[in-house]
Amino acid sequence: MKMSDYNFLQPYTFKSGIKVKNRVVIPPMTERMSFEDGSVTSDECNYFSIHTGGAGMFITGCASVNEEGKGFEGELGAFDDKFIPGLTRLSNAIKQDGTKSILQIFSAGRMSTTAILRGKQPVSASKIPAARPGAETPRALASSEVDQLVKDFGDATRRAIQAGFDGIEIHGANTYLIQQFFSPHSNRRTDKWGGSLEKRMRLPLAIVDEVVETIKKYADKPFLLGYRISPEEIEEPGIRFADTLALIDELKKRPLDYLHVSMGNVFRSSLNNKKDQTPLNEKIKQRIGDLPVIGVGGVETPAEAENVIDKGLDFVAIGRESIREPKWVQKVEANDEKSIRYGLSLTDLEELGIQPPYRDLIMS
């Protein structure tokens, strides 16, 4: 297929007015190349500068909105104004050849450890450990601390604006703190932040509303706002797809620019209802209407990317393949698909800007 025939190379204009040059997204991936305190490193900027320029949007790995939100070593920080100069360097490294830079913001909650938090106990909605080996029992956040958490997401958004990012993505997926408040497994609260489905939705929606107000206050030009979800949990009790559809009904009332659905396979069906083989993304897109959806999970080739768009999703994320082939989009545009690299050798790492912590993640 010739470049001009691919729908994923067509531009898109969001409701906010921001136009992206194509429908390809580099999704957030943990690269563990920040300093211990969350500051941006030169190695990190170099990596992003190598891997950007082709996709319409490039979303960073998660940046913590407060110190207790740190989930792993080498994670970006967005919890203090001291990080703004480094975040500015990172944003500028991404913004090449029209690629839009998006900062993903999050708090890890119970997915962290006392060691990572330098002696502090991890926090969550309730005192329920994650259903995984070695998980620590977290401390339940007080109601006043939840109020502060909402403000922390707003402050991180302000810093992203001041650092020159084109948008932020709220990380409400992958079992991190926002999802922990939404999940009946991790949220056993009896105050306004937990209990019924409506109360468990309160924190995600409060964070979205806070971020919307922050954008209105500080952005002097259109600024993208995305939200990432994991549609199901397998825990008992846990998030079921009907819960997610209810959350989507509320999210689409807000001025979001896109929904990013985090799954290992973009066409995966339900983990809990094996009888229903309809892809969850198909159901989400039907429910969400004209709000753009980013599909991610196992997409490598141009044909696979095109299939995602043909199936009705608005954007396709190229994750692990973009690590191996940073010029994926450019090679498609040049009608040079045969030169796309689908493997990774240790001898490629220096050329690709991959430093040891990241190497250990992707080569394991």
Image: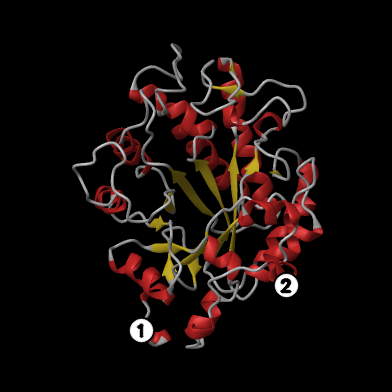
Image quarter (top left, top right, bottom left or bottom right) of the N terminus? bottom left
Q: Residue furthest left?
A: 275
Disc 1 target residue: 5
Horizontally, residue 15 falls left or right of residue 75, namely: left
Q: Residues under labels 1 and 2: Cα distance?
A: 31 Å
The location of residue 16, given as percent across then percent down, is 46, 58
Label 2 secondary element: helix
Horizontally, residue 173 falls left or right of residue 265, namely: right
Q: Nearer the viewer, residue 15 or 186?
A: 186
- Would you identify the image quadrant in which residue 348 lies? bottom right
> Residue at horizontal 72%, vertical 21%?
120
Q: Earlier in the sequence, mark 1 or mark 2?
A: 1
> Residue at horizontal 26%, vertical 47%?
287
Disc 2 target residue: 351
**Amino acid on which disc 2 is placed:** Glu
Res. 89 in view: no
